[in-house]
Image (cartoon, rainbow, N blue to C red):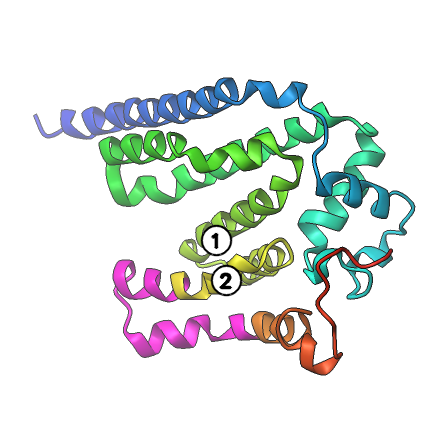
Amino acid sequence: MNARRPAARSSAAPSRDLVVLAALALAIAALSWRYRDAYSLPFLNDDYVFLDATRARSFFSLWGLDHLFFHWWRPWSREFHYWWLQRAAGISPPAFHALNTALTAGVFGLFTALIAPWLGRARTVVAVLGLAALSAWSLPLLWSAGAQDLWMLLACMAALLTWRSERRALAFTAYAIALASKETAAALPLLFVAHDVLLARRTWPQALRRAAPAALVALPWALLHPHLGGRLLRHVVIEPVPAAA
């Protein structure tokens, strides 16, 4: 009787994985179908500004603090994103929407991998399908510039996954990419601390000490960002229109 139990457990694990993967596939397929009209939409609003301003830029010029759109510093998810994609696919709205769909799928995949060990099969399925039901996905899936949010979310999910697996250097690297995508990522170290205290059962001093190197990423970013410390250091005037490229 005892010899049969490990086999039963090992055979049950793949079935649980298949159920979670089926829910993940269903969530991505439902979102793709719900926002399928995106592929017939043209570029909108800021898309034209980003495309025109990055069209003739050099690779190294994408990462500076000059000629920023609305003075937000988002070199990864905006300048670099529009720069390489229009070189790879041309001025093609469907290509930009397709990449946003792929980024969304990546976010869902990493989110599922992150929560499944903690929540178990049933709760993971509910969480994934509930996430797909949110109307907030309409903006990044209907507007090309929503890639800024998607890159930030993808990098944050990657940071949390690598943090959980004790690859902290990779977690801090992903955190830097998240900050270079959108400012909302600044609070991510709080989740590192929450993970260590609530899930890994570390003490507060241990958790704070482990997350402290994130300051080496966040503080320089905050000091230089034109909407934060950069306003004082560089006397940046915040304008309601994009800075001239």
Name the residue nearer the viewer: 206 or 47.
47
Residue 13 placed where, x, y %?
Answer: 28, 28
Query: What residue is shown with label 1?
Result: 162
Let me know if residue 211 is in the magenta part.
yes
Q: Which mark is on residue 168?
A: 2
- Vertical comparison of 213 with 92: above or below: below
Question: Could you tell whether 69 is left or right of 170 in the image?
Answer: right
Quarter of the image where one finds residue 134: top left
Secondary structure beneath label 1 = helix
Which residue appears at 76% of the width and 48% of the height?
80
Which residue appears at 73% of the width and 39% of the height?
47
Q: Which residue is farthest bottom?
A: 233
Q: Main secondary structure of the magenta part?
A: helix
Q: Are marks 2 and 1 in contact (CB under 8 Å)?
A: yes
Cα separation between marks 2 and 1: 7 Å
Let me know if residue 144 is in the magenta part.
no
Residue 101 placed where, x, y %?
Answer: 58, 29
Name the residue nearer the viewer: 170 or 80.
80
Q: Which residues are magenta?
A: 192-215
Residue 162 placed where, x, y %?
Answer: 48, 53
Quarter of the image where one finds residue 220: bottom right
The quarter in which the C terminus is drawn is bottom right
Work out whether mark 2 precedes mark 1 in sequence or the reverse, and give the earlier one: 1
